[in-house]
Amino acid sequence: MDKPHSSYLISIVAGEYVKLQDYYLDIPLEYYVYKTNAKYAKLSFEKTPEIMKFFSEKIGYKYPYNKYAQTIVEDFIYGGMENITATTLTSTTIHDERAHLDVSSDGLVAHEMAHQWWGDLLTCRSWEHTWLNEGFATYFTALYFEYARGKDEFQYSVYNMQRTAKFADMSDKKPTVWNRYFDPTDLFGPHIYQRGGAILNMIRFILGDELFWKAINYYARKYEYQNVETNDFKIAIEEATGYNLKWFFDQWLYKAGYPIFEVSYVYNDTTKTLRLTVEQIQVADSLTPEVFKTPVDVEITTKESSKTYRIFISERKQTFDFSVNSKPLMVIFDKGNWILKDLFFEKSKDELIYQALNASEMIDRLWAVQELGRMVDKKDVVDVMMKLIKSGEFYAVRQEAINNLGKLKDESTARFLIDVFKNEQDSKVRRSIVEALKEFKFDFVAKFLAEVIENDKSYYVIASAVNSLALIDSVNRMSVIKNALAMDSHQEIIRTTALRRLSDFKNTKYEKEAIDILKKYSVRGNHPSVRITAISTLSIFADKEPSIKDFIFGMVNTPEFIVRMVIYNVLGDIGDQEVLNYLKLAEKKELDGRMLQAIWDAIARLERKLKG
């Protein structure tokens, strides 16, 4: 290496590999894979030159090193690691053409490539600032999807970031910049990955694209080959754009939580005005601000026109008045879903239908379809769901409409979904259909699901069909599961689905047979995903069969990292004093922070259990 770098980024990998060669401009790109899966490597790595080109041009800073390699490793304990110029990846990212219908390595490749700038060229000064590595890589993956797959895919990626960040906040609330931890791995969760990505998206919204990318370029060049902390990024934004975002950093990076908005509006036909009322109702505490200040785009659509206004929220409760030419057909708060938030905005059925069919942003149509799910007993709502499902809408909107129809459970809806399936090319949509059909207990549905299992090309659609068929055909459930256990698939998605359904046999005449099957798939020699699922499901029966605890405890020294971590977790629920004593010894020999956390959690649960 002729460039300075942090020592934790060094990597040495030894093994019997096949080297595949590629290039971006004059930069060699190397892919090291096993001989057994070399023929599939192109499916995983073919977008590498495009991703490098996109990041180089978008950041305004060419890939900073003289080559880039990607090496797969069996039983790797992460998805990927951004080792400098030589990323290490889990071997599970390699997949065949059939799996490629549902699975892509593009997100993993883009995430680790983004780290070559954000994490390697610039490296966080201490782990409390690691969102500068992981939040950036998460967001830049979404930006690549925006470039390669379109705006709808980008918005859906951000939506999923926000959803994950909010869910994590409910159980483990902490700021994005946080220095209280037992082990650095304690910090590597949604508050730095997904919340960090959502924070960058809000900065982009505030600055606008031109100034956002000016700031990103300036930040990269100002701190190249240096260690950085969060305040350095804030200073770089200020110096590049003139925007002082101290208020933003204070509430989003050094605090936790997110705003919960209650929004309503009143239209006055006499004065032709619309009054919008916005109130934040989140519970304030030492970590969560009483008021999140933020700009918000509000779109108001009438028969004559559609206009977007930018307002600024700075108080707990505010009202905003707008002049309009007639009664609104649609009012959208936070058009484009830029803000990390919860939103409660009561709308009429007609307005939601209008928004679901006419909003210019996919994410606003998706929100309306979700809200209409509460009214799916109405015929006109059902008609809209069916229209969307048969349309060329973005797949996530269609999936949500399918989920809504799944609540109906009537014969005509089941036949409609089956007819759509037969002409549907997108495996994600087909999968949603067979998942929804688990609510329709008709013989013709069971027959259809059996045909899907027999004939569909997608491993993941088949897995979902196995799950649905096992749920609705209780008489033949065991034979459905046994047949599925004989089927090979990508990452064992079909077998693991079948194994999970064995939990349905607890307290039935098939209980012993289910336990025997689960034991068979729990032992070494099975794929790690199979072992994890079998062990977790087997533990459900432990209260009826004490020997299960001894069986699982006997595998506690398995060398497979993730399997061992799951065993520790399960033993925290079904263990005894002997297990507790062992866990306290294991705590002293395990090194990985995630493994230690699993042990600590298991010890805590067992101690509570044994104390009564």
Image: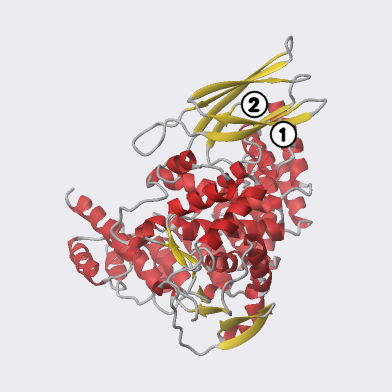
Q: Is residue 75 visible?
A: yes
Foreground residue among 27 and 407: 27
92 relative position to 383: left or right: left
Q: Mark 1 is on which residue type?
A: Gln
- Residue at the far top in the pictured view: 270
Q: Quadrant of residue 353?
A: top right
Distance (Cα) linking label 2 and label 1 = 10 Å
Choose the circle earlier in sequence order: 2 or 1. Answer: 2
Position above or below: 102 against 88: above
284 relative position to 364: left or right: left
- Checking the image for residue 215, the label placed there is none
Residue at 44% over, 53% down: 230
Q: Position of residue 286 (x, y in %)?
A: 33, 36
User: In the rendered picture of this protein, how many numbered marks are placed on residues?
Assistant: 2
Instruction: Estimate how packed mark 1 is, as few (under 14), some (14 to 19) or many (20 or more) residues with alpha carbons within 10 Å.
Output: many
Task: Report the residue marked by disc 1.
Answer: 355
Foreground residue among 260 and 221: 221
In the structure shown, which secondary structural element does the residue marked by tag 2 occupy? loop
Instruction: Estimate how packed mark 2 is, as few (under 14), some (14 to 19) or many (20 or more) residues with alpha carbons within 10 Å.
Output: some
Q: Mark 2 is on which residue type?
A: Lys
Position above or below: 429 against 56: above
Residue at 78% over, 19% down: 325
Q: Quadrant of residue 584?
A: bottom left
Q: Position of residue 127 (x, y in %)?
A: 37, 60
Task: Report the residue marked by disc 2.
Answer: 347
C-beta proximity under 8 Å, tags 2 and 1: yes
